[in-house]
Amino acid sequence: MRKFLYTLAAGVLATTAVYASDPVPAELRQSALEIFRPLPSTIPAVKDNPITAEKIALGKALFFDPRMSASGVFACNSCHNVGTGGDDNLETSIGHGWQKGPRNSPTVFNAVFNVAQFWDGRADDLKAQAKGPVQAGVEMANTPVQVVATLNSMPQYVEWFKAAFPGEDDPVTFDNFAKAIEAFEATLITPAPFDAYLNGDENALTLEAKQGLQLFMDKGCASCHGGINVGGEGYYPFGLVEKPGADVLPENDKGRFAVTNTADDSYVFRAAPLRNVALTAPYFHSGKVWDLKQAVAVMGTAQLGEELNDRDVDLIVAFLGSLTGKAPDIIYPILPAETAATPKPTANINN
Amino acid sequence: MRKFLYTLAAGVLATTAVYASDPVPAELRQSALEIFRPLPSTIPAVKDNPITAEKIALGKALFFDPRMSASGVFACNSCHNVGTGGDDNLETSIGHGWQKGPRNSPTVFNAVFNVAQFWDGRADDLKAQAKGPVQAGVEMANTPVQVVATLNSMPQYVEWFKAAFPGEDDPVTFDNFAKAIEAFEATLITPAPFDAYLNGDENALTLEAKQGLQLFMDKGCASCHGGINVGGEGYYPFGLVEKPGADVLPENDKGRFAVTNTADDSYVFRAAPLRNVALTAPYFHSGKVWDLKQAVAVMGTAQLGEELNDRDVDLIVAFLGSLTGKAPDIIYPILPAETAATPKPTANINN
């Protein structure tokens, strides 16, 4: 009993100590809950694709299988590496034939919560997204026909597709390939200190992170970077107030304009989802900014028309650090062995 | 009791049924034990490198970390993929700048038991081997200085090196990098049905696998492919009796000659360790043969001077299938985040 009282007193003291110098309002968490949402504790449902354990297991194998690429070199995990924040830490990804991709690889973590996929939102969801890189000539350079032939050549994959898509006459399809990957990716959710805070744990954030959160809302960052992914919910012009330099915002990439073909969408991009942003340098679709502080400063001038001072930048970066979450444990999948019928890998370009 | 008797009777019947048509001698297993050894149940000790849990954990992170390559694209696991038999299923690996490596990537599984590493045995052990690909211009194209700078730039890595090499003043070294990788690789052991058989389980092998084992010993395959790894223990000329064609044995790769500079070592290679061989096509140092049956037939003519008939080849392949083991569960490591001090990746060749 004596020990309990002591612990309690220490707890109160600690709390008091924090609050004594805390300039954030008592209702900060309530204000935050009007803008942000914590991650759920369960795997989210996705459209037209019931998620089952069998589908997740198949999707995990496909996600890690380099034989889904023409060369046999690249898997989904190559550019969306679950060990490095769900992306590849490159300016833009290196793909088939050592070609450089056009835009920075976004993180796969929590991507299931984005309104749409890719920097320009050209894929409605993860199953549509999954079909892109595998066919892109500068990425995996494969074809749906070849992917399906590769999968059908390995009896273990055929069994796994049957288990994941029961009742289908011909389950090994490119659509189901994409659906299985979507199911696995839906499990890649990373609860962070910010979630604990939103869920009621006042001690989950440091004072600096709370002050940064306050600034993030007060300055207007949260106008675009809100919701469950602190971004990823809408489209906005990059350079709303002042266009950044051509290194950060290259002239020849007009963003969502290429999707909608409307002038208003020139240099419009999906607001980046900011979960795990401390792990996913370099930043922006161009991948030209390696320092998170610099990225925050660029956002200040480009989107808010305000030169944020060093202290404000530091506090916002402290808040962003609270978005770094715990990735799920993923046991590396043992992939099916090739057979004589498996298409041979080719390193040729435009084969 | 009645059920027990029935089960016992069924067991006896099954055993009898196998043996009734079994032409393999009763002492087959004993003969095999004079040539082969089962895998141990514990992680083997390695020279000058005490293996600890901390070293294994660090080595696992390093093994999966693409930032150990100059480009940030390739990790050890890229070419020694633990999901696909411990190799990359390519003729020869694709590396930095989309260059093609000179020889087929050997499996990392059970490599700790090989007498030496690489096809020509030029590295005495796995810690020596680990320093090779990371520096090879056509593979990871990095330098020891850059590797150490990269590691030192991430406080989490520095902590892990301190824990793995306690008491060392400056634990973050290229030598320790290699030792940690060796420690992790020493855990990559894959017990197979053949081990269960050697350990006394007569039912672990099919009749065909046993017949294949008998042939494998009778024909002389086991003269080079013996020991714990069914190979990997000594050096032999490829084309001992008859040189295979220049596609399989390219003239410009003289194997161990480049290591020893003695004429006798022309076209001499380390006998391939055959564990998991069913998973590691394509075959030979040239990676030119994709079909295991064809590889066995090539060995028959090249090494034994004998055209093996189809049935013999099938039986030997059945035996080789019993060498496919269970890879350990590996949880994908969460890697340290880069900092401002982390050297930037470069895709340039000869930078």
Image (cartoon, coloured by chain):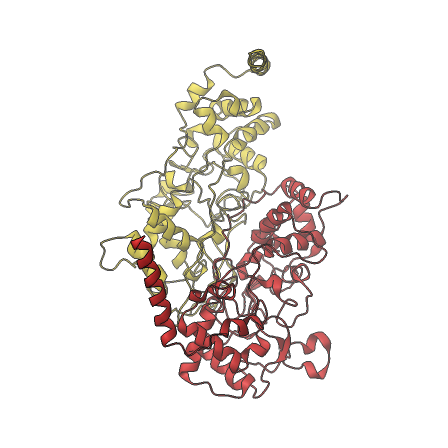
Chain colours: A yellow, B red
Left or right position of A284 against A54: right
From the viewer's perspective, is residue A100 above or below residue B237? above
Left or right position of A290 against A57: right
x, y (%) of residue A203? 52, 22
- The answer to whether residue A21 is seen in the rendering is no
- The answer to whether residue A189 is seen in the rendering is yes
From the viewer's perspective, is residue A28 above or below residue B338? above
x, y (%) of residue A51? 31, 44
**Quarter of the image with the C terminus of chain A in it:** bottom left
Q: Nearer the viewer, residue B8 or A36?
A: B8
The residue shown at (59%, 74%) is B271
The residue shown at (68%, 69%) is B122
Check the image and name the residue furthest to the front. B1
**Quarter of the image with the N terminus of chain A in it:** top right
Q: Nearer the viewer, residue A342 or B226?
A: B226
Left or right position of A135 against B87: left
From the viewer's perspective, is residue B291 above or below residue A126? below
Tell me which corner region of the image, top left, top right, bottom left or bottom right, holds residue B235: bottom right
x, y (%) of residue B311? 40, 82
x, y (%) of residue A106? 46, 45
Q: Nearer the viewer, residue B206 or A232?
A: B206
Q: Nearer the viewer, residue A75 or A290?
A: A75
Check the image and name the residue furthest to the right. B169
Q: Please tell me how many numbered marks the rendered image carries.
A: 0
